Image: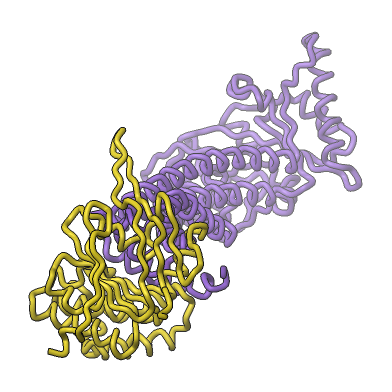
Chain colours: A yellow, B purple
Amino acid sequence: MTDVLIKLENVWKTYKLGETPLSVLRGVNLEITQGSFVTIMGPSGSGKSTLMYMLGLLDTPSQGNILLQGQDTTNFSEDKLAEVRGKRIGFIFQQFNLLQNLTALENVMLPMIFQGISEGKRKEKAKQLLESVSLGHRINHKPSEMSGGEQQRIAIARSLVNDPEILIADEPTGNLDSTTGKAVMEILTKLHREQKKTIVVVTHDPNIAKYSQNVIHIQDGLIVANHFQESEILWQK
Amino acid sequence: MAKIDINNLKEYLKIAVKTISTRRIRSWLTTIGIVIGVFLIVSLLSLSQGLKNAVLQQLNMMGKDLITIMPGDITNVSSMMSGQKLTDADLKIIKETEGVDIIVAMDYTSVVARYDNQKKTVLIYGADWRNDLDIFKNDMGWSVSQGQWPSPGRAEVVVGSIVASDTFGGLRVGNEIVIKGRKFIVAGILNSVGSKQDDSMIGVDSNIFQSITGERNGAKMTMAKIEAGYSADFVAEKLKSNLNENRKRQIGQKENDSSYTVLTSATLSSIVGNVMGLIQAVIIGFASIAIVVGGIGIMNTMYTSVSERTKEIGIMKAIGAKNRTIITIFLIESGIFGMLGGVGGTLLGLIFAKTIEIYFQIHPLFYLRADVSPGLILFSLSFSFVIGCVSGYFPARAAAKLKPVDALRYE
């Protein structure tokens, strides 16, 4: 049996819109196993982004528990959660979410600064990662001087610097054309295959889902389907 | 854990500097708020301290064993303005008071003097060159820069430094000055004694002074030199009581009306110190208000910055920034505003104070040296830095309190 990395137990997220409470997640139970490649799909407003924020420990449930390798995170302080995110989770966003004032290299080094890693090590690791996503020649450029695909590759490099166990990607190809999007997905697939990273991709694009072994459909705050693909994944074709 | 943050201060400083430099105009405007306050503190305090020093220095030149006696009460302006004089009887009492060695009766009046077809109103004073010269030279610290002191009884004058440089520009030893139709030879020109009024006066023999002005009795003020072994305070008290008793006897005053002012150099110094201290306190008060207003400007800028960078804060939190990391970054930023304002204000204040000092060297109204102490600079810099940090604290805390998910969703 494979290890469970993240487990959601009866997770609810309820917002108050004026007087009426609105439940975005309604009792979600989910297990993400170590080394899996999971796609979460659903139409907009289905709660898939909220689910992603829960899995990334960026948000806390109104009810229910989130377990990280069996450890309940409910009572973690904000700083503890920040530490866990910094060390064990890497994020890739649709909008890339790079700091515009910083160069590619500085953006990639930032998560290591928060972990107190020395400058020499930071530079070495960041350069190496930027080279691995074919951006070794553009390390001193700012995000505004780069294309969408390049920015997303910086973001991928940034998500990897602290060697996280899990990568969470929110519509990683949403702002990219199909060729660039494919390149990004190939990088993620490679990370999964070669480095055994656990990868969670949130998307509404069925083509993206083809890359993964486990596709989860969410609708109206509930998981309506959770199926596993038997065959080897698309990138091989 | 806090140790990690200290090691990272350099990195956070870099981030803060980058942010500040990308919002250049706003950063300058924010800084100017602090610059103005610090500028006021540095320039006005250094100038007022310089003024205080100038006055005290002048008082110190007078010597510790001289007591100044003037008619009227120094705390009562109308009695000082009434033009009273010390009578001959007063002078006699002063001379006979226990502890008084010799006295110099100073009488002065304004007259029109003529030199080389220029007519100017000047103050002339009568001096007994035979008996009083010693006090002028040794106790009051006066000295001639050119020529010599006038000979007793001769139609000679000694002029203050400003008379030769300014009032009658080009006046030299041996030139002729006409006062009230009588010709005088300039025997000497004095070195500056440190006060514009004293440097603008012309000294003549006391007998000649009486004959050309008609002021034969009494004196406007007198200086008493204390005998060795007596304290200035003791003699000052004696002088006061003797003079008041005599006045009571003469005109039967019931009240103990202190219609004489008896000042030792110590009391004069403390009066000057108190007045200048008060002025400086007012300056500090107003300039501090200016700095606090500048601080509110910083706070405003920082709140704007927090709301503009909500998303950025969310990103940093998502990739592992703790709350105190966010607070530190924002505090450094506002601290830089305060510090920059402090440095800018200090520099501008120094330049302004030095300009004023140079102006007064060229146009000697009085002698003013801007006194810029390291303590003053340290105070302004640290005060402005602290104001910067304090103003940044609440915006920084607001930034740190943002939930990562809300901050990331913010557009």
Instruction: Provide residue A13's location: percent of width, then percent of height.
Output: 35, 50
Instruction: Provide residue A45's location: percent of width, then percent of height.
Output: 20, 53
Quarter of the image with the N terminus of chain A in it: bottom left
Out of B108 and A74, give the one closest to the viewer.
A74
Q: Quadrant of residue B359?
A: bottom left
- Against A68, residue A212 (above or below) is below
- Against B264, residue B406 (above or below) is below
Instruction: Provide residue B61's location: percent of width, then percent of height.
Output: 68, 51
Quarter of the image with the C terminus of chain A in it: bottom left
Taking the image as drawn, is residue B62 in sight?
yes
- Against A145, residue A16 (above or below) is above
- Identified at 59% across, 19% down, the residue is B78
Taking the image as drawn, is residue B168 in sight?
no
For this view, does B113 lie left or right of residue A180? right
Q: How many marks?
A: 0
- Identified at 31% across, 60% down, the residue is A51
Q: Quadrant of residue B257?
A: top right
Q: Quadrant of residue A65?
A: bottom left
Instruction: Provide residue B363's location: percent of width, then percent of height.
Output: 42, 52
For this view, does B240 lie left or right of residue B44? right
Out of B63 and B169, give the one closest to the viewer.
B63
Out of B274 and B89, give the one closest to the viewer.
B274
- Identified at 27% across, 55% down, the residue is A222
Out of A105 and B54, give the one closest to the viewer.
A105
Q: Which residue occupies the extreme left position in the image?
A: A178
- Identified at 62% across, 24% down, the residue is B80
